[in-house]
Amino acid sequence: MPSIVKPLVAHPSLARNELGLTIRDYEGSMSTLCAGCGHDSITAAITRALWELSTPPHRLAKLSGIGCSSKTPTYFVSGAHGFNSAHGRMPAIATGANAANRELTYLGVSGDGDSLSIGIGHLCHAIRRNLNMLYVIENNGVYGLTKGQFSASSDVGSKSKKGEANRMSPIDPVQLALSLGATFVARSFSGDKQQLVPILKAGLAHRGFAIVDVISPCVTFNDHEGSTKSYRYTRSKQHVATESDFVPPASEIVAEIVQSGQTHITMHDGSVLRFTRVPEDYDLHSRQAALSYLKEHQGEIVTGVLFADESVPDMHEMNNTPQVPLATLPFAKLCPGSGELAKLMEDFR
Amino acid sequence: MRSRINDFAIKLANVNGTGSASANGLIMQAIFRMGVPVSGKNLFPSNIQGLPTWYEIRVNPKGYTARALDYDLMIAMNAQTYERDVQEVRSGGYLLYDSSWPLDAELHREDVNFIGVPLARLCNEHFREPRERILMKNIATAGALIALLNIDGAVVEQLIEEKYGRKKALRESNKRALQLGADYVREHFSCPLDFHLETMDANGDKILIDGNTATALGCVYGGATVAAWYPITPATSVMDGFKEFCEQYRKDPKTGENNFAILQAEDELAAIAMVIGASWNGARAFTSTAGPGVSLMNELLGLAYYAEIPAVIIDVQRVGPSTGMPTRTQQGDLLECAYASHGDTKHILLIPANPAECFHFAPKCFDLAERFQTPVFMMSDLDIGMNDWVTPKLTWDDGYVPDRGKVLTAEQLESTSKYFRYLPENGTAVAARTLPGVHSKGAFFTRGSGHNKFGGYTEVPDEYQEVMDRLLRKHKEAAGWVPEPIIEERAGARVGVITIGGCDPAVREALDILGDTGRPLDYMRIRAFPFHAKVAEFLADHDYCYVVEQNRDGQLCSLLILETPVAKEKIRPVLIYSGFPLSAKHVIDVITAPDVITGKAQELNAVYS
C-alpha cells in the first residue's frame, strides 16, 4: 500500500474526453493492494477505457464480490455508485440491479476465488441470462487475502509459495464461458495494457454478457518460481491469438481492403471492434473455433478477443421489458386500482 | 337423532394424483356459493402421484373455520389409509366407501353407519377410458355428497358450466358422473343425512381465496416490478400468481411490453441477491420462499441489513428443520427470520393471519422496507398460503401513496455540498439514500464491510459502533409503524392468550368455548415484530399469558421474553407443531390439561375455580 495520497487537482494540460473530463475524473481512491499487484494495472486499464469511452461517471455501476480483486472498484471512477457485495454473489446482485435499471453501464470486477469457486453458479447463470454487463475476472490463481491457498484456476503442477503442487484440474473461465453461451469472451494479461484497454472497451460496448479473464499475478503469494500465474511465466507463455482496435460509434470508418485474417465486428451501439490480427481460418463467431484453438494451444496462455456474437438477445429482451428502467415506472402504471380489484373479486366467488 | 343444519365436518381420504383435488374444490365452492360459512383444509403429501391425501371440509353457521377433528362423515377412498380413517369417524357418524369390492370385516365399526357406493363399478360401466374412469370416480363421489348433504344441484351445475363451458365432452362426463353418484345414493339410502346443508346468506360480501394468491395480488398492487425466486413448496404459487396478475395488469396496452421482470434464480442466494440489487437501484423487489430458502439467504440478509438496502421476503413457512415436511404447515421460522444472518441483526416481520391480511400486508412490507431501508419479512405459512379461505372481498384505497422513504433527487443532490450515505439529519434513525445513475454527487460505495457514518471503510471501534447503534434505533422506531396487535377483551378476564398468524380461528373458537364455560380469557394476536408498544402493555395487564403457536420451541415465547420486559414465568407456551392446521380442541386440551411435570391441573383451572 502506497504511503502518499493523490493530489486533489489535475494538471491543466491533461487531455479531456467528449464530456470534458480528464482521466483523473475516472480515478478513485488510492489502492491498498500490494505494490506491483496485477490488479492495479487492470484498474488503470479500466480507468482509461471508461475515460476514452466518455462514460458519464454517474451512469456507471461498478460491482464486486469479496477478495483482493473485489476491492478494486473503489480505486476507479469515484463518481460512480459502487457495490462491494458478498463473496461470489456479485453476478446475482448485478442481475437484480440491471433488471431494475437497464440504462446504466454495468461493470463487475471479480477474482478467481469469487467467480470460479464460491460464486461459480451465479457466474454460470448470469452468462445464461446474457446479462448486459462487462465481467472482469482478475485471475491470479491464488487466495490472496487469506494468504496463499490455491484457487480453482490453479494449474496442475503449479506450486504454492510453500512449494506444494496443485493436483486438481483447473477451471478455465474462458472455456467455461464459451461452453455456457457467453456472447463475448476474451482473455488478456494485466501486463499488457495495450491489448487490454480495447478489449475492455469492446466488452463495455457489447450487448450482453462480456467476460474478460485477465491473468493478474499476485506479487505476494503467487509470483515465484514454479507458479504458472507469475509475471515471468505469463510473459513467456502468452500467445496473442487476436489483436484488435476499438473504434467508437461516431468515428468515420475508413473503407479498407480486408486482408487475409482481418475482420471487424460491429457492436450493438455502432462502435466497431477492428481486428488487426486473427489467425488464419479463425471464425470469431464460432464457439467451436475458439475451443479448438485453445486446445491446439494447450500449455500457452491464449489472449485476445476469442469469440463475439452481437445477435443474441440480452436478459431484458428475453423478458420483453420496456426501454425505460422498471425502477422509474410511475406507480399509476403499476397499480391496477380499486375498480379492477372489484371486478377481479367476482372470479373468486 | 337431532338434525344439524350447516354444522358438521367431513373428511375425504384420497390418493393423490387421481383428480380428487378438483372434486374437493367443487364441493367446497358449491357450499360457499350456498352462502354457508365453510372452510377447507388440504392435507397433502410431498409427492405428485400415489400417496395419501386428505381434504377436510367444515361448515359452521357461526363461521368457525378452524379444523373440527370430529368427523361426521368420512369419505374413505384410499385403501392405504382406510384402517386409520375409519377410526376418525365420530360415534354415530357415517363412512362412505367404494362397495365395488366387499369391505374387510375387520374394518367394521358397530357405532358407525356405512354407506356403500359401487363407485368403481358405476364408472367402469359408464366411462370407457381408463384415466377417465379414475377421474370420474371422484366426481361421482361428489355426486353422492350432493344427495347426502343436500348440496344445491343448480349451484353445482353452474360451477361445472363455468369450469368446462367450452369443453363440451368434459362438461358432459362431469355431469354424468355427478348424476351417477347422486342417483345411486338417493335410491339406496335415506337422503339427506340428519346433518346437511341449507342455503344461507353469510357469504354475500366474501370470496374464496388462498393466501399465496392474495399475497401475489398485494405485490402487484404495492408496485413491485422485480421478483426473483427459486421454486419451493409451499411458496411457488406466490410467484405463479404474481406472473398471472402481471400478465393481466402489467402488459403495456400500447407496446405489449412487460412492466415487470420475474427472474427464476439459480438458488435462493441468488434470489435474494437479485432483490437486493434491484432495490439498490430503486425498484420495489421481492422474493417468495420457505424456511430452507431463508436459511440460504441468511448471508445476504445481513448485507442488506448492514448496508441498509430494502428487501421484501415472503416466507411461506413449512415444517422444518432441514427438508422437514414440505407440504405441512408450521410457524417455525420466526426466530430464523427475526435475527437472520451472523452478527447483530434484527429484522422487521409482518405476520398475516389470513389471505386478506396477506394482500394488505404486501404493500405495507414495501413501505416499511423502503422507509427503514432494511429487509422486511412477511411470515405467511402453508395453511394460509395454500388453503382456500372465506375472506371478505379485497378492497383497495386509490388514495394509497407508496412510502418510498428518504431518497434524494438529482436536484436535491445538486444543491448539496457533500453527501454522506449513513449520516441522518438531526439525529434521526434513517439517513437519506441515493440511487445509482441519478447524480455523481450521490455516488458512494455500498459495502457489507465495516463502515462509518460517512459511508467510508472503517475498522475504528467507535465509528463501527456508532452505525450499529443507529441500526438498533431504527429497528426500535419501526415498532411505531408496524400493524398493531388485534386485542379482544372479555369481562372478568385476568389471563391472556397470545397468538399469531393462522392460529387465529382456532384460538378464537377455543376462547369462545372457554368463555362460555366460565373461563374468560383476553385475546391478543400479534401482527408484527418489532413488537408494537401494546404488546408489552397486554403482557403487563394480565396475571399470565398463554402463547399459542405452531412450533416446538416456543419461538414467539422466546421473542417476547427477549424483546419485552415480561418475566419468563408469566409466559405459558401452548405448542402445537405436528404439521396440520390447528383446531380449537388442540388449544383447549393444552390449556386445560394437567401439567405434565407437576401432575396438577393447569393454573387456569385454579384461577377460575
Image (cartoon, rainbow, N blue to C red):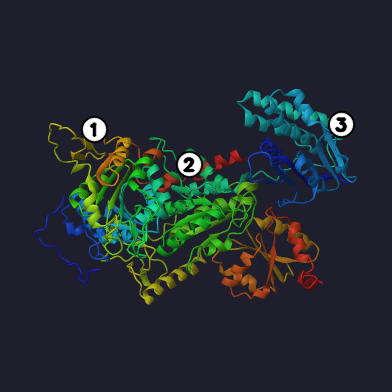
The residue carrying mark 1 is A281
Q: Is residue B525 above or below residue B46?
A: below
The percent position of residue B184, horizontal first and vertical second, equals 82, 29
The chain holding disc 2 is B
Quarter of the image where the N terminus of chain A is located: bottom left
Q: CA distance from mark 3 to mark 1?
A: 86 Å
Instruction: For marks 2 and 3, give the one nearer the viewer.
Output: 3
Q: CA distance from mark 2 to mark 1?
A: 49 Å
Pointer 3 and pointer 1 on the same chain: no
The percent position of residue B41, horizontal first and vertical second, equals 69, 47
Circle 2: residue type: Cys
Circle 1: residue type: Asp
Circle 3: residue type: His
Q: Are the residues at dot 2 and dot 3 in contact (C-beta closer than 8 Å)?
A: no
Q: Quadrant of residue B403?
A: bottom left
Q: Is residue B508 above or below residue B494?
A: above
Q: Is residue A172 visible?
A: yes
Q: Is residue B599 above or below residue A333?
A: below
Pointer 2 and pointer 3 on the same chain: yes
Q: Quadrant of residue A35?
A: bottom left
Q: Secondary structure at mark 2?
A: helix
B414 vs B554, nearest the viewer: B554
Q: CA distance from mark 2 to mark 3?
A: 51 Å
The residue carrying mark 3 is B188
Residue B68 marker? none
Q: Secondary structure at mark 3?
A: helix
Residue B246 marker? 2
Pointer 2 and pointer 1 on the same chain: no
Q: Is residue B454 left or right of residue A26?
A: right
Instruction: For marks 3 and 1, give the one nearer the viewer.
Output: 1
Q: Secondary structure at mark 1?
A: loop
Of the two numbered discs 2 and 3 on the same chain, state the one appearing first in sequence.
3
